[in-house]
Image (cartoon, helix red, strand yellow):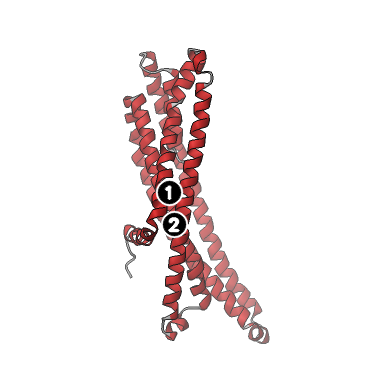
Amino acid sequence: VKKPEVWTTYKRLLGYSRKHWKFMAFASIGIVGEAMSAGAFTMLMKPMIDQTFVAKNPEVRWVLPLSIIGLVLLRGAASWISDYGMARAGKGVVLDLRKQVMSKFLRMPSSLFDQESVPALVSRLNYDAEQVAQASSEAIKNALTDILTIMVLIGVMMFVSVKVTSAVLIIVPIMAFIASRVAGRYRRINRGIQEGFGHMAQSAEQTLSAQQEVKIYGMQQSEENRYADLALTNLRLGVKVEATRATASAIVQLMAGLALALILVLASAEAVQGRMTAGSFVTLMTSMMALLPS
């Protein structure tokens, strides 16, 4: 059976989210506020360094600290708005899916219940629906926030130095390629983990429901081994997820180190020529560190 394309799947999820567009529109206000606050904070690095530590200008003694507090409060409010709006939309999607799936189950022919265990169906109704909510709300929120923040921070970096920013952006496609490969592996492994939970629930339900027969025929060890094999398979899949995350993190950190080294070399050259101040360099470094994955 041919598996659906990723975009086709997410398009269907967006269709479920469309019903809750008011909450998503409310959240988008906070998302824009978060991105703009991140850009404003990095821009504040330049006067903070140049006027406070270099020029030692007494006029900014209170202006800059109050500006920082204002930005922190603004970003906190924007984060609350985006989190609440997306969470409310996501929970609404969960409710819609659970009602739709339960309605579908109640109208399925009895023969289909013989082909799949009740615990697997219950797991799909509860666990899988919750995962869909995360994909349709939290993932969308994170994607929009990251995209807008990246655009704002790149704009700040271009404003400070087009030459340095253009050179650093060469490394971006490599990071994007790594991220796409990791995301694909996550999807494959998580699909196996979800199926594994269903098999584990089915095995436990069958064994415990027939516990008298198991004891009569002395099949305790056999049933223990069967459940242990399923649990071990699930453990291995979980370890693969963590191994993939650790490997990707190490590679991204290496690429980040190269990018920061490149910034240092080019920025030093511009500083010698008088085209970059200490504050401008700190702004570049702050923006670059914010852009890099953790």
Q: Are marks 1 and 2 in contact (CB under 8 Å)?
A: yes
Mark 1 belongs to which amino acid? Ala
Locate the N terminus and report the quarter of the image it occupies: bottom left
Mark 2 belongs to which amino acid? Ala
Numbered circle sitting on residue 89: 2
Residue 58 lies, in percent from the top left, at 52, 13
Q: Is residue 2 left or right of residue 239?
A: left
Residue 228 lies, in percent from the top left, at 60, 69
Numbered circle sitting on residue 27: 1
Which of the 4 image quarters holds residue 33?
top left
Q: Is residue 105 left or right of residue 3?
A: right
Q: Using the image, determine if residue 218 lies above or below residue 184.
A: below
- Please name the residue shown 38% across and 18% down the image: 276
Q: Is residue 260 left or right of residue 216?
A: left
Q: Using the image, determine if residue 139 lies above or below residue 213.
A: above
Residue sitting nearer the eye, 89 or 239: 89
- Please name the residue shown 43% across and 62% down the image: 93
Can you see residue 195? yes
Classify mark 1: residues with Cα within 10 Å, few (<14), some (14-19) or many (20+).
many
- Please name the residue shown 61% across and 73% down the image: 225
Which of the 4 image quarters holds residue 161?
top left
Residue sitting nearer the eye, 98 or 291: 98
Distance in Å between CA atoms under marks 1 and 2: 9 Å
Residue 91 lies, in percent from the top left, at 48, 60
Numbered circle sitting on residue 257: none
Q: Using the image, determine if residue 50 lies above or below residue 23.
A: above
Which of the 4 image quarters holds residue 273?
top left
Classify mark 2: residues with Cα within 10 Å, few (<14), some (14-19) or many (20+).
many
Q: Secondary structure at mark 1?
A: helix
Q: Using the image, determine if residue 121 lies above or below residue 3.
A: below
Can you see residue 258? no
- Please name the residue shown 46% across and 30% down the image: 41
